[in-house]
Image (cartoon, grey):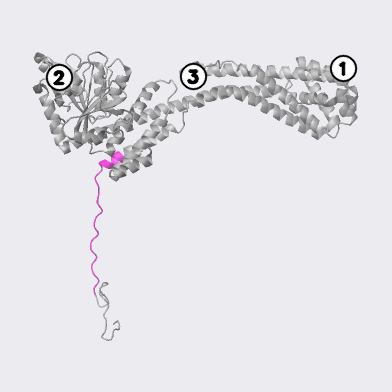
Amino acid sequence: MTEPEAEQAAAGRRVPDAATAMVTALVRLRGALQEARLPLELPGAEAQRVARAEMVDQLEDYVIPRLMTLDAPLLAVVGGSTGAGKSTLVNSLVGTRVTTPGVLRPTTRSPVLVHHPDDAKWFGQDRLLPELERVTRQTNDPEALQLVESTAMTPGLAILDAPDIDSVEERNRVLAAQLLAAADLWLFVTSAARYADQVPWDFLRKAAERSAAVAIVLDRTPPEAVDTISTHLARMLASRGLKDSPLFTVEEGPVSDMGLLPSGSVLEIRQWLQALADDQEARAAVVQQTLDGAIRTLGRRTHTVADSATEQVDSVRRLREDANEAYDRAVKGVGEASADGTLLRGEVLARWQEFVGTGELLRSLETRVGWIRDRVVNAVKGKPQQAERVTVAVESGLETLILEHAEAAAERAEASWRSTAAGQVLLRDAGADLGRASRDFRRRAERAVRDWQDDVLEMVRTEGAEKRSTARFLAFGVNGLSVALMVVVFAHTAGVTGAEAGIAGGSAVLGQKLLEAVFGDQAVRSLAERARVRLEASMSDLLDAERRRYTDLLDSLEVSPEAPERMRAAARKVDDLRYAATQPVTLPEAEPPTEPETGPEARPALDPPQVSDDGDTAP
């Protein structure tokens, strides 16, 4: 139900304006809780995931529907431990078999709701536990709610027999907790043998925390132990904040063929429920107590879930920063190594020197600067196949450089994630080895490098479109000029030091002058800049694709940075409305009456005008 639907439904049921505002605020709170994601395995996250689910269920199953139908019958949910005798107690209170006690444990069956025929309209699909199918037959389907009409029930009261809270079947336990959270009144059944068990007290603690109306039934108690056990149980209730909860005892006794206890055994409980159902004010007080307690607790618990959501947001941010840092470092490393002359050594340098020649040409570059262009043109001995060898060497060198940095980035990102428990779980569930570059990365790198080389070739071809007939252009060819441009790009920042500096620098100067001999200074600077930018963009795209293996994993978690504040804001609104509802209404003070004017010029404002005999209005 959306906020507008909640307001419309509340208005259609004549819910007061204050209640309509509260319904709207609670619907907003439910939406904020539903949108919150707590997927990372952080300390305490599992408990808060459970709490969030419980709160959403309670809002949908009880709080919102009950607030919109305050005059609906009081719902008493009978819950308790395995073998406590809940179904037998319900049958005995009604006076006939309406629910089947479990003979085998665990018993899987639908919960049973018994009500007066006149109250049937209150228990439709939209009123209580809307996800449970309504049936009127006995069934073992835990997804169904069995409705039983009985004239033995007092109008205004319904009793629901819930599954065991400590069932070995998880579905039974979850459903039992869900039903108890949807109760106006808990009728908690335990036995002389089980009253000190931990599980029932966990439920009772939750009831005390949210001020739910609770009555305790000490069932199947030997007559001689009634006083001792009931006294001890009463002290336990008082110490746990439930001293005002009624305590009833049912002595162990024979059960009839119909599965009923003697009428006198449950007379006190029946009379108490009857009196509660007959007293409209008392019934409303129980509903209001439980409803107010649930709303108050929802607000408090929401802030705890919001704190956990904040931890999730912070953890996702840190994991993202770690992955980004690893790949940013790789992108920077590739960019620096492809521009500082690092690539102009080994195979690339050897093939380049084969193409342009060495010795006399390089010496002339050092001593005869004024003759550079002509000497470069005349000295180049390269053949087309030698230019191709440079291209292949460049391709291999770039691929190796990129692969090394991709592998290093993957290792760094994985190591940083493995340092946290949340990151370890994400890596485990990723379905791939994120500590290595992708299996197809080498192929993609090869394709990217070849595409860049093709771009360089096309730039040279386009730039030399009007120079193809010149002797210089024909001497070098498109391939030769392209490899010269690549060499210039690789020594953009001239960062190599030591002996290699002269070699790399000389190679770059040689390539620069070769290009200038054909295109001119300005054109060469433009070509080199465009080639460098395209190379950096291509390498960055490659590594960003690897980075996304990590960041897409984080994106799939759907952890919204705004979710914690949305929850807190929704909880504050609910608290504000709840507080406002407790304040007395102050009526505005009446203004003192105004004294009438007196004196010769005073004239009653409402006196009708005087009309003379001839029909004129007198002054």
Local secondary structure at mark 2 = loop
Image height check: is 23 above or below 129? below
Q: Do the residues labelled 3 and 2 touch (CB within 8 Å)?
A: no
For residue 414, above or below residue 14: above
The magenta region covers: 576-598
Q: Which amino acid type is marked by label 3? A: Leu
> What is the magenta segment's predominant secondary structure?
loop
Question: Of marks 3 and 2, which one's residue comes earlier in the chain?
Answer: 2
Q: Farthest residue toward the bottom? A: 614
Q: How crowded is mark 1: few (under 14 residues within 10 Å), some or many (20 or more)?
A: few
Residue at the far front in the pictured view: 137
If the image is split into quadrants, where does the N terminus sit? top left
SS label for mark 1: loop
Residues packed near mark 2 inside 10 Å, few (<14), some (14 to 19) or many (20 plus): few
Q: At numbered mark 3, what does the secondary structure look like: helix, strand or loop? A: helix
Kindly report the distance in space between the C-alpha atoms of the residues bearing marks 3 and 2: 56 Å
Closer to the eye: label 1 or 2: 2
Residue position for label 1: 359
The residue carrying mark 3 is 426
